[in-house]
């Protein structure tokens, strides 16, 4: 992942990502948070590729680790969370999924629209899973290439239209072509296989509507 790209458009990240998903991403995020809160009333959560902290802002759990290699993204997240979740504990870690070392095991690993940004998917998932408590859960929502008509249309939009919109909103020096390429390479089976390889049991897997994203939950077996 080219961190400099994210550094340069951090201030427009939320707008650009909503456009990339045709406005569906906020809906997916709310459904995702609802499911986590059904499973855990509270706990210690690590949100990987947290970007501007939108996901953590909705969770607002007692203790939160926000992981992202972009310092400007983390600064925006900090500003948001100090206003929206007073009294909660937040730790901002400028690092990657492959390299992060948490100071304690966590109940929840959250990877919302994050896996496509891993430099090495299997290595990142394995490193994060190792820091999950027994009985803890790894939650994933990711845009994927399902090969269907709708997915192909969405990929065309992301590869051809989103880069144009992104340059207008974030600046001509920002290249969004990587977004479409990363999604095209991401498939449901690749995600599930990476979670299983790390030792997780798949407890839920489903397509979201529209069928351009997948929701997967992996659970770490209790010892």
Image (cartoon, rainbow, N blue to C red):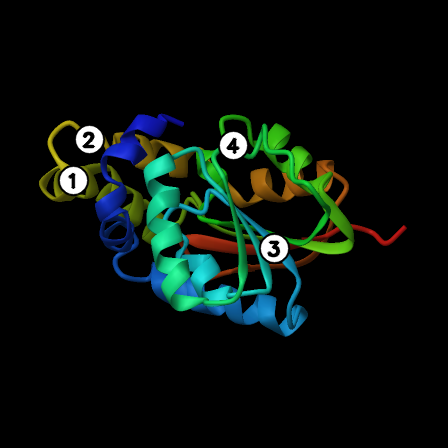
Which image quarter is the N terminus in? top left
What label does residue 92 carry, if any? none
Q: Which is closer to the viewer, label 2 or label 4? A: 4
What label does residue 170 carry, if any? 1
Q: Earlier in the sequence, mark 1 or mark 3?
A: 3
Q: SS class of the residue under badge 3?
A: strand
Q: Where is 40 relative to 172, above or below?
A: below
Q: SS class of the residue under badge 4?
A: loop
Q: Earlier in the sequence, mark 3 or mark 4?
A: 3
State yes or no: discs 3 and 4 in contact (Cβ < 8 Å). Answer: no
Q: Position of residue 94 (x, y in %)?
A: 47, 35
Give the crowd class for mark 3: few <14, some 14-19, many >=20 residues within 10 Å: many
Residue under the point 63% across and 37% down: 125
Of residues 201 and 4, the one nearer the viewer is: 4
What label does residue 174 carry, if any? 2
From the image, tell me which residue sits under label 4. 96
Q: Position of residue 103 (x, y in %)?
A: 68, 41
Give the crowd class for mark 2: few <14, some 14-19, many >=20 residues within 10 Å: some
State yes or no: discs 2 and 1 in contact (Cβ < 8 Å). Answer: yes
**Alpha carbon distance from label 2 to label 1:** 7 Å
168 on left or right of 177: left
Q: Where is 118 relative to 196, above or below?
A: above
From the image, tell me which residue sits under label 3. 45
**Alpha carbon distance from label 3 to label 4:** 16 Å
Of residues 64 and 112, the one nearer the viewer is: 64
**Alpha carbon distance from label 2 to label 4:** 21 Å
């Amino acid at each position: 992942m080219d961190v400099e790209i994210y550094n340069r458009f951090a201030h427009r990240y939320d707008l650009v990502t909503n456009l990339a998903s045709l406005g569906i991403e906020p809906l997916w995020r709310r459904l995702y948070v609802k499911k986590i809160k059904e499973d855990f009333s509270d706990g210690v959560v690590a949100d990987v590729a947290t970007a501007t902290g939108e996901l953590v802002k909705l969770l607002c759990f007692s203790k939160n680790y926000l992981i992202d290699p972009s310092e400007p993204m983390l600064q925006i997240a900090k500003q948001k969370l100090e206003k929206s979740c007073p009294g909660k504990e937040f730790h901002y870690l400028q690092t990657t999924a492959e390299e992060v070392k948490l100071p304690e095991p966590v109940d929840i690993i959250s990877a919302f629209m994050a896996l496509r940004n891993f430099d090495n998917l299997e290595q990142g998932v394995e490193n994060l899973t190792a820091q999950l408590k027994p009985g803890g859960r790894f939650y994933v929502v990711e845009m994927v290439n399902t090969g269907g008509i709708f997915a192909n249309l969405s990929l065309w939009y992301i590869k051809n239209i989103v880069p144009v919109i992104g340059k207008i909103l974030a600046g001509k020096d920002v290249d969004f072509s990587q977004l479409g390429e990363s999604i095209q390479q991401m498939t449901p089976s690749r995600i599930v296989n990476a979670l299983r390889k790390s030792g997780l049991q798949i407890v839920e897997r489903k397509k979201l509507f529209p069928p351009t994203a997948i929701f997967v939950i992996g659970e770490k077996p209790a010892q």
